Amino acid sequence: MLKFKDLDDRQCITHTVKHLPCGNQISKGELALATSKLPELHNPDNEEATTLDTIIKLLICANHRKSQTGGQLDALMRKYRSELLEFAKTRELQSFTSYRPWRQSTRVSVKEKLGVVIKENESRTGSVYGYTWDVVPGLIKIGYAKDTTCGRIKQWCKCNPGATQVFSVTFDFPHRMEELIHRQLADKRQELKCNLEACPSTYHNEWFSCSVEETEQILQQWKTISEEEPLYDLEQRGTYWVLEESTARLSDELRYDRKEPA
């Protein structure tokens, strides 16, 4: 991880109005993301000032990040520019997070989950969303939200600072749709280690080694099917449909048979 004088204890690099060290800590995730962006300072295709601005903002606590003016940020960039450039050039950057294949021994297939009646407390409307994080290229987080996705993404950014939402698709019973998609991609599912001290989870297991394009295609397949005729009875919450074959990964075209809900 990034180590230089002002950040040995992940201290915010700003000072109070009395010119005393801020004292607040930045998160491990913010420090880690700042570290991951350091090599960009020596990339001729990137604008140094823009990269420095991103890194500096990550090294500031949440309170000061809201109050810093353009002039104050420029002063911090001038103060730390040389040190950041030197660190990026001479130090070996260490990985600050890790992930591993999902360690779930018992897995329910898409077909099995599709046939389960939806619980009464599960939301009738909402969205399935996806976001990516520069820290773990090649992975995508797939979740659901009862209302708008903004609140969920904001919550997750505490664990994954700088995460970017890449899609959001509305569905009836979004939690069930999320579960179906998770099972469809079960062979690609990963557990990502969390560096946020306040987070109760050591690993988050809704990450998938899947491209944004492939994930969007799968969501659109489900969206198309559910728009042709509802997957579930809105009152009884039982399914109208059964897949012809039980598989954790669906083919390019989903196949289904009509049946009456039990």
Image (cartoon, rainbow, N blue to C red):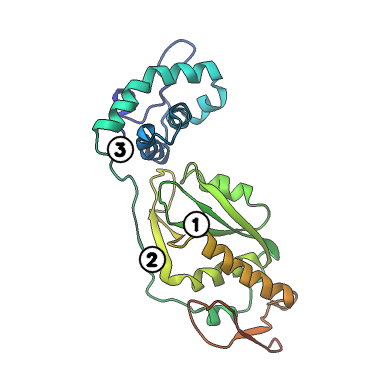
Q: Quadrant of the C terminus?
A: bottom right
Q: Nearer the viewer, residue 22 or 132?
A: 132
Examine the rendering and report whether any part of residue 15 can be seen: no
Question: Which residue ends up furthest to the front in the rendered image?
Answer: 44
Q: Secondary structure at mark 2?
A: loop
User: Pointer 2: what residue?
Assistant: 102
Nearer-N-terminus badge (2/1): 2
**Residue depth check, mark 2 versus mark 1: number of the one nearer the observer:** 1
* Within-10-Å neighbours for mark 1: few <14, some 14–19, many 20+: many
Q: At x 38% / y 66%, what residue is drawn?
A: 102
Work out whether 195 lies above or below 41.
Answer: below
* Within-10-Å neighbours for mark 3: few <14, some 14–19, many 20+: some
Give the numbered dot on residue 141. Answer: 1
Q: Nearer the viewer, residue 193 or 254?
A: 254
On the picture, is 90 further left or further right than 79? left
Work out whether 100 lies above or below 15.
Answer: below
Q: At x 62% / y 47%, what residue is drawn?
A: 151
Nearer-N-terminus badge (2/3): 3
Q: Tell me the amino acid under the disc marked 1.
A: Lys
Tell me where residue 15 appears, x and y as whole percent: 44, 17
Q: At x 38% / y 45%, what residue is drawn?
A: 195
